[in-house]
Image (spheres, helix red, strand yellow):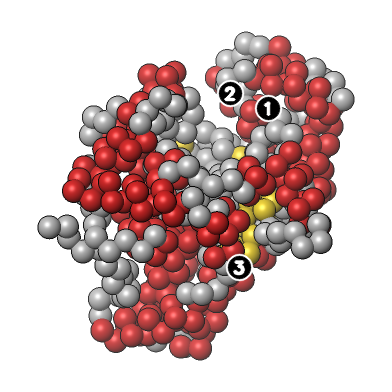
Amino acid sequence: MPRPLTLHPDRLLPADPATRTLARELYASVASLPIVSPHGHTDPAWFARNAPFGNATELLLVPDHYVFRMLYSQGVPMETLGVRNPEADPREAWRLLASHYHLFRATPSRLWLDWVFAEAFGLTVRLEAETSDLYFDTITQALASEAFRPRALFDRYGIEAIATTESPLDTLEHHAALRKENARPGGWQGKVITAYRPDPVIDPEFEGFQANLARFSDLTDEDCGTWQGYLAAHRKRRAFFAAMGATSTDHGHPTPRTADLPLAEAEALFAKVAKGPCTPAEAELFRAQMLTEMAAMSLEDGLVMQIHPGAFRNHNARVFQRFGRDKGADIPSRTEYVANLKPLLDRFGNEPGLSIILFTLDESTYARELAPLAGHYPCLKLGPAWWFHDSPEGMRRFRRMTTETAGLYNTVGFNDDTRAFLSIPARHDVARRIDCGFLAELVMEHRIEDWEAAELAQDLAYNLVKQAYRL
């Protein structure tokens, strides 16, 4: 007989009864606040076209690398899950997920998926082999209805704003269509904006880098064979992205190294990487210089700068060759910030008009490096626990290791950074519960007052993210 699926109302709240009572009150005050999702990887075409999602697998399995990386780790071939394989049977792929769902016990993915199953689709039994077809049919049937189209779900879950992330080579036609829809009398008013992710034209080790520069030239009518033309192309594309609503940039570099080279050295380095090939050291130095150049442009145009370093991308070469990027094989690596950021901070660190949000996959840097940096430099803020640490324990560790030195107001609230649309409300619910539990503990230890905790709960769930991302 299928086991029941229930979501306990006190899940993730502190175990101590008195602390849990206060955390419950704090959570109730923020649970229904609008969601601001300032950084993620959902597809803007979903909202521009508002076409129905096809089936359970298309919505919940194929876009979510958290899910299929776990299945792959247990020997399930990616092809059978529908990853880069349009011939895969979506029902059979879902059956594979169902029969392996026990693998997700105690993981964040289990929290998010169970929330989606129960809250979004009203399922009352657990996902397992016996209930696989019930799940697939229930979810797929719901997705065919108007209530489960992308815009309806956006409105249903109180999403106030969502930012997608696009390359400078993207034409942003879906964002253009959305802006026309927003301006049309009676048109849908959902706020979907873009963010400038220039890695394909900044990282000399990005596949097709030289061809990307040629495309960059074509899009901007600038000569990206010269250093000044290349920088001018960035300024033009940044302005175009801002016209499509962008308030931020995003940089996914291997390290947070920065540089501030003299003009002649920067020109010579660019000539080398633009022509190719270049050495790994030259590629790293160019990325470092470009972080500083991007900071200079952010000071000019007001775009908030996000730095997401420290991932060894595409670690599994065979998976990368067969399935491409973002297939669950990115691995955290040791990351240093104090020395690496110094050239940029020497130039811009004292500029209150510049806003740089730092993320990390190396938790050892929270208390030693990141919190002291953000607790001093006016331009720096700390992004929330990210990627592998976007989890209950990861969020707790982040708060406990950064708050005493950086404070809470040098952080930026929560962002979900997801490709899986329905995990957005699920992830925000987890973050609000964890933060309310943390604040309740501070009250019970007499470190803050209860009224301060109530204000902070609102700030962490809603106000800080709007301020930090200039929304």
Residue 382 higher or lower than 287, as above or below? below
Instruction: Compute the Cα span from label 3 to label 1.
Output: 31 Å
Q: Is residue 85 left or right of residue 347?
A: left
Measured as percent of width and height from the top left, residue 173 is found at: 74, 38
Give the amino acid type for the residue marked by disc 3 in the picture: Leu
Instruction: Compute the Cα span from label 2 to label 1.
Output: 8 Å
Measured as percent of width and height from the top left, residue 22 is found at: 37, 85
Measured as percent of width and height from the top left, residue 226 is found at: 82, 20
The residue sitting at 43% across, 43% down in the picture is 55
Secondary structure of residue under mark 3: helix
Q: Which residue is mark 1?
A: 201
Q: Which residue is mark 2?
A: 206
Give the amino acid type for the residue marked by disc 1 in the picture: Val
Crowd rating for badge 3 (residues with CA inside 10 Å; few <14, some 14–19, many 20+): many
The residue sitting at 28% across, 51% down in the picture is 134
Secondary structure of residue under mark 2: loop
Q: Which residue is mark 3?
A: 464
